[in-house]
Image (cartoon, rainbow, N blue to C red):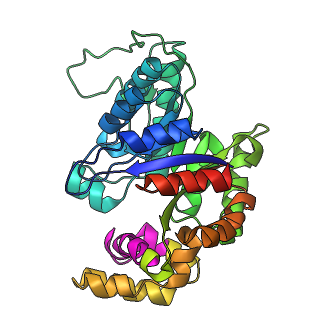
């Protein structure tokens, strides 16, 4: 099991994660990842960290597909890949209707169809075998209905690699199966090593559709696992609960919240209902208080070093290939490196 570092997206103020990324680089971590929601973008901080590190791979977890046309994401990825001499990892995802339509101002559409078209377009651009021409449900290149002057084009630059690794952020059955079918890796959120059977059927379905010898041996499952070290386990858990409450309760609406669905899949529907009801009625503290300790322990690592070492065993043996650490504490980073590498 390799280690990664997720520095996430900024809150209200910019965060300088250079020292953290450099320490991960020194410790032999596989990758450092940035994210975006509706504030800081994923690309700018990633390039900054890439320039300040030497060997560690740099990835986006995630770039929102609806925020960028696939040709732009392909261009961004191959530019960073050239600048870093082959360290780029392209993590993309659909986000959710709340952000897509409320922030980017575009229809949410069909996320599985969009992702399939997106990946095909990016790979065509990187291969540079012919000018880009694609006519799908979401993307029409060259587009019809414009000036009529558009023509198929081929990238001016030659990529450092003509096949940059692509990771899909996926939650539901169809998206997870699609990741296994067309991507090089999967970026799960709120992954639990105790719930691998929940996902295994979907992954196997995707591998079967790939039509090659694709399986878990050549596919990177890379969940972000939030880690809070400290002597007081309850206090550590309380640092994780606000994020779980936000996503389960507030990142979507009733009937359309992918993170609520995860909690239900894991057997926490009663708690998820309470969290969502509290959050959507403005009772955020009550929503945080409704997050079960057991759910926190399934998806995160909390407590003193000895407890984290004990619980880390399940992550090492559950079949994931890269554990991306969600922490901003450099001592926690060093401890995980000691325990896991």
Q: Residue at x 23, y 48 (%)?
A: 14
The reply to whether residue 178 is in sight is no
* For residue 332, above or below residue 7: below
Q: Residue at x 33, y 68 (%)?
A: 251
The reply to whether residue 269 is in sight is yes
* For residue 88, above or below residue 301: above
Q: Residue at x 25, y 18 (%)?
A: 148
Q: Residue at x 38, y 89 (%)?
A: 274
106 inside magenta stretch = no
258 inside magenta stretch = yes
Is 146 positioned to the left or the right of 132 in the image? left
Q: Which residues are magenta?
A: 237-261
- Of 227 and 244, nearer the camera is 227
Coordinates of residue 29 in the picture (x, y in percent) = 57, 41
* For residue 75, above or below residue 103: above
Coordinates of residue 32 in the picture (x, y in percent) = 48, 41
- Of 256 and 17, nearer the camera is 17
- Of 161 and 1, nearer the camera is 1
Is 204 positioned to the left or the right of 134 in the image? right
- Of 12 and 191, nearer the camera is 12
Coordinates of residue 222 in the picture (x, y in percent) = 59, 50
Q: Main secondary structure of the magenta part?
A: helix
């Amino acid at each position: 099991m390799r280690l990664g570092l997720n520095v996430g997206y900024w809150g209200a103020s910019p965060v300088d994660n250079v020292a953290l990324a450099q320490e991960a680089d020194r410790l032999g971590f596989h990758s450092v990842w940035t994210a975006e929601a509706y504030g800081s973008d994923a690309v700018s901080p990633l390039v900054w960290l890439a320039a300040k590190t030497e060997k560690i791979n740099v990835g986006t977890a995630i770039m929102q597909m609806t925020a960028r046309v696939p040709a732009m994401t392909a261009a961004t990825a191959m530019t960073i890949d050239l600048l870093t001499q082959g360290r780029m990892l392209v993590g993309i995802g659909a986000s959710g209707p709340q952000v897509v339509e409320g922030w980017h101002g575009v229809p949410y559409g069909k996320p599985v169809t969009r992702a399939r078209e997106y990946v095909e377009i990016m790979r065509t651009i990187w291969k540079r075998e012919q000018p880009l021409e694609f006519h799908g449900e979401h993307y029409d290149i060259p587009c019809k209905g414009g000036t009529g002057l558009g023509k198929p084009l081929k990238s001016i630059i030659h990529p450092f690699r003509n096949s940059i690794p692509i990771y899909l952020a996926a939650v539901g059955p169809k998206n997870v199966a699609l990741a296994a079918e067309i991507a090089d890796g999967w970026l799960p959120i709120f992954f639990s090593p105790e719930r691998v059977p929940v996902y295994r059927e979907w992954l196997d379905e995707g591998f079967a559709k790939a039509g090659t010898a694709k399986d878990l041996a050549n596919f990177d499952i890379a969940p972000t696992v939030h880690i809070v070290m400290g002597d007081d386990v309850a206090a550590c858990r309380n640092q994780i609960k606000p994020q779980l409450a936000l996503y389960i309760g507030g990142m979507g609406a009733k009937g359309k919240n992918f993170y609520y669905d995860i909690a239900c899949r894991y057997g926490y529907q009663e708690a998820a209902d309470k969290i969502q009801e509290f959050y959507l009625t403005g009772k955020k503290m009550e929503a945080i208080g409704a997050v079960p300790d057991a759910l926190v322990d399934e998806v995160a690592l909390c407590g003193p070093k000895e407890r984290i070492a004990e619980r880390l065993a399940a992550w090492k043996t559950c079949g994931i290939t890269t554990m991306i650490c969600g922490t901003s504490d450099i001592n926690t980073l060093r401890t995980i490196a000691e325990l896991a590498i």
